[in-house]
Image (cartoon, helix red, strand yellow):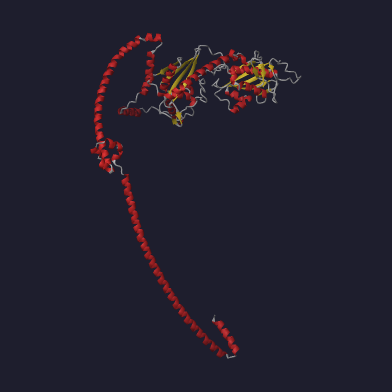
Amino acid sequence: MSSDTLKKRKAKVIRSDGGTPENKRGRAEGEQSEEVEERRRQGCVHFVTLKKLNRLAHMRLKKGRDQTHEAKQRVDVLHLQLQNLLYEVMHLQKEIGKCLEFKSQHEEIELVSVDEFLKEAPAEISRPHLTKEDPHQLTLARLDWELEQRKRLAEQYKSSLCSKEKILKGIELKKEYLGSLQPGLQAIMQASLPVQEYLSMPFEHVQKQAEVARHLPPPLYVLFVQANAYGQAFDKNLTVSISGDVDEAKALSRPPEDSQDDESDSDAEEEQQNTKRRRATVGVQLDDKRKEMLKRHPLSLCIDLKCKDGSVLHLFFYYLMNLNILTVKAKVSTSADLSGAISAGELLNSESLLNCLYASDHGQETPNPGNRYQFDKVGITTFADYVSELGHPYNWVQSLGGLQFFGDAPQTEGAQSSLSASHMEATMKLLRGRLQSRLALHKQFSSLEHSIVPVSSECQHLFPAKVVSRLARWTMMSYQEFMELSFVQHVVKAGLMKETDLFFMATVERGTARLQAAVVLNPRYPEITPLFSLSLLWKGERSGRTDDNLRAMESEVNVFKSELQGPRPGLQLLTNQIQRLCMCLDVYLETESQVSDGSEGPREFPREKMCLRTARGPNRLKPFKYNHPQGFFSHR
């Protein structure tokens, strides 16, 4: 409480007592001084107490710091001891690791097993009483035994060398004796030539071919051996021959000689002196690199497949050394003249004769994936640009040569005889079948171009005796012309044709009706059926996409291959399809209802075919199936 407040209160009390102001003032000052003195004493006591507490706090703080310092010193001592122990442990671990990783020279020696050592080694070396319990003594004993064994083998090696020298001397004596027999044998072979020709046993020719075959590259050699073996075992009409420069092939097989330093120095001096010589341009260098990369081996192989009709398929096989692939060229020679049919010009073309012998094997790109990187270095975009010059690298050609490619690199470095043998028989049958089918198609096209559909006697029962519709025209089309036809777009979209196929246009007529048939002939005919797309020009234009009956006619010629194939191998399939197309057109026109007067058929096309029902179903499909021998038409 403040002094002013006390004064006020005391004043009020004095005022109430009724004393004089001087007395009241004196009394108040006395009381106030006593109170101040009392409070001063209390303040001094409190100040002394505060100093005591401060001193105690400092003493306690110093004591706490001392205790903490002592504890930290004890911890530091323990931590230092721990670090020393860890360092010693790490040092010991390093020493242990060095001891464990130490490799002695005896570890590189392949010692015999412990069981074999204890079984074969004598007791003075094996010392079982020591080695069985001490691994170190066991290792030393095994090393001693190995030393003894090697000394013994060294003695055997010396004796073997002496016997080898004796055998070599004997071989040299026998070689000299056999060399002296060579002139006599040659004289005997020359005297036996007339006998060989008379008996058709050309031993000398076979011997010469065998000598030349030694210089063939491995793929051509495998093909030569396997083709000869197949011809002798199964096909007497198959002949194999080797052609090319034998001397150049010998030079390739000979290892290159080491160049002399003097010659290289003289060549360098001549190049420095000849300043008039100009450097080749980049284009010329690339051309040289391409020629070198596409270089063929000087020896080639020719396989002739003869047929019963006298025609021969000549196959010329080449080996591209830097690309490690085989290529083939084909040529056909026949006894008859085959220049009459214009539309058959592509059938025996050497560029397309062997296309798709196996499915999707067009022979336009190299089958070796590693060649792609080689082509990039010399600027070759596609191998197809060089096919006409070098031949086609079909996959079956690589298989015949024993070459097999897998992934990004050849699977094997050398040619495999087993791979060639496994493909030889099937491939030769396909090649002979391809030649027969193309020759048969050539004869058929010659007749078709003269509006004659040849039907063999074995297939006469497939058609009625009288077919009024006739083939008016048979022409060949290009791939671009086929693509422009409107009624074949469904075939194009479905992917049922390829650029390697052959395309033809057949026109069948009867009266004012004209039926156009676009034919897609696959190279693997007759294994793959020719595909027909139809368009009828009669009272407007109709196609298989707009007329259900034309679609049914397409099914008759495209789907039912087993009925039209005839006797094996089914080479009459195409002409039978065309004849059935003419028959179906007769049924279509004769059964078409006449809108004008509602009679049985149009007056232009009198009814000549016997049908059980002229139409069936909501689509009013016509009866295109011919039933033999009843002679009527019915629905399928």
Residue 377 visible:
no
Q: Quadrant of the C terminus?
A: top right
**In the displayed structure, would residue 45 be above or below residue 526?**
below
Instruction: Place residue 555 in its image quadrant.
Output: top right
Q: Quadrant of the N terminus?
A: bottom right
Residue 147, x across and y down, in percent? 25, 36
Q: Residue at x 60, y 21 (%)?
A: 560
Horizontal relation, residue 263 to residue 571: left or right: left
**In the displayed structure, would residue 501 be above or below residue 60?**
above
**What is the count of numbered marks?**
0
Horizontal relation, residue 632 to residue 597: left or right: left
Q: Residue furthest right?
A: 597
**In the displayed structure, would residue 571 be above or below residue 77?**
above
Name the one closer to the observer, 334 or 429: 429
Residue 623 visible:
yes
Residue 352, x across and y down, in percent? 52, 21
Residue 207, x across and y down, in percent? 37, 16
